[in-house]
Amino acid sequence: MPDDPLMLSVSGMRGLVGRSLTPPVAARYGAAFGQHLKQTVASGRAPFVVLARDSRPSGPMIELSVAAGLIGVGCRVVRLGIVTTPGAAIMIPHLGADGGMVITASHNPIEWNGIKALRHDGVAPPSDEAAQLIDRFHAESACYVPVEQLQPATDDDTTGDVHIERVLAQVDAGMIRQRGLTVALDSVHGAGGPVTARLLDALGVRLVHLWAEPTGLFPHEPEPLRENITGLCDAVREHRADIGFVQDPDADRLAIVDELGTYIGEEYTLALVTRHMMARDAAADRTAVTNLSTSRMVDDIAARHDGRVVRTPVGESNVAAAMRHEGAMIGGEGNGGVMYPGVGLVRDSLIGIALVLESLAQTDGALSAIVADIPRYHMLKSKRALPSGGFDATTMRDALARRFPGATFDEQDGVRIDWPDRWVHLRASNPEPVMRIIAEAATEADARDLIDQVTQVIEAG
């Protein structure tokens, strides 16, 4: 990768602040999105755009630049301030906006920032629409309006209220309050701290809150991985908490620590919520949607409840589209992203927290016991440079079929190969020029063997 990468993908834009991501670049991207919206709204009407940011110190600079680009092409902008990405997504249809932009680099370190575009329904645009936006950005084809068409930005501070109200409507808050749970929460000085504290107060838990203030000065690497959250594990043990949660900076991802202070990981987040939902809503159509790179724990849980799992290409917008089409009760991704239709078809750590707490309150058991009831797998991830000729899924599939006769193949997104007790998925990354290989099996050795065999096929050409 170049020293100063500017990554453009279905996930939006990400870059290094002051290097690849500068105010002019951010303004161009805002203008490109505004121009894109002008092609979709009624002729003569100014597009209405919601603008939000996470807590990063570079946020105000990028927000002002994006706002300038949007206003410059004739958009009406409402600023939400520092809010979570799911909160911003909820506010787009709530306010009747045509789209939204969130200034965030998700789990990336502090020197990064980014811009995420969202549609009128709060969902990220599909790949074809994202490609059009990227082309418009590169073409610098924005048409700026005359002064009499410029509209001043306004502010709205109700995001937290709307988000909490929607989450509380989906769970039995009284039952959670009666359980008297203690929760340790690491908000990594991100956007989720204040609103999540308010939600937990409404649910009657005793909160031990680490790094609550949304300063954007991350106390550790912000991706919610085992090696980054030792402080939360210690706090769970010290305060005898029933559970520990960790959010990423824009609070769309959620990882979990059990009552023993053991990190159980992001893959368990969707599995725990799926288990709870399929047991709680037994009369509903028990369909879960997730992507091809998510653990098969979800499949095992669905099988127990006569449910089904629909798999999609990687990407939040792909999961959201399938959830809507299938009428799914739950969905999400293995990176700790829970998507619940009753709140919004976006990854949302707040609804994930509320549903896991409801599960604890309902079973009256320890989290470690619930986790032990879910079949355990080992997942390994690897990446390597793309072949010189690029990623040809058909050619790759043919070569892999010769290596793995009798396996089941899925070519929605690269190639996924399935057996009853294991799988491996290889695909080209969206934001990076690499091939990702993910394998899951009952043992780490078996998962490693799958990655090694796939790598041999790739190297053999």
Image (cartoon, rainbow, N blue to C red):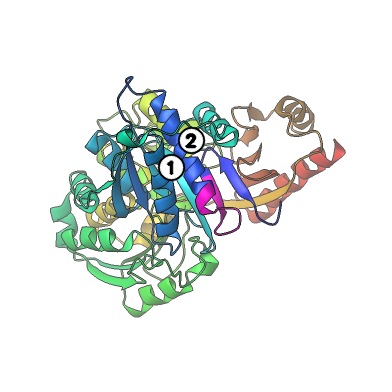
Tell me: 412 left or right of 97.
Answer: right
First to last magenta residue range: 13-24
Q: Residue furthest top?
A: 43
- Callout 2 touching callout 1 (CB < 8 Å): yes
Q: CA distance from mark 2 to mark 1?
A: 8 Å
**Dividing the picture into quarters, in which one does residue 137 lie?**
top right
As rendered, which of 319 and 59 lies closer to the eye? 59
**Residue 127 magenta:** no
Q: Position of residue 77 (x, y in %)?
A: 31, 42
> In the image, what residue occupies the spot 36% across and 27% down?
324
Three-letter amino acid code at the position of disc 2: Ala
Neighbor class of circle 1 (other Cα within 10 Å; few <14, some 14-19, many 20+) is many
Residue wearing tag 1: 69
Q: Position of residue 453 (x, y in %)?
A: 77, 43
In this rendering, the answer to whether 259 lies above or below 396 is below
Which-is-in-front pick, marks 2 and 1?
A: 1
Tell me: 251 left or right of 424.
Answer: left
Q: Position of residue 29 (x, y in %)?
A: 50, 41
**Dividing the picture into quarters, in which one does residue 433 lie?**
top right
> In the image, what residue occupies the spot 19% across and 57% down?
176
Q: Residue furthest front?
A: 147
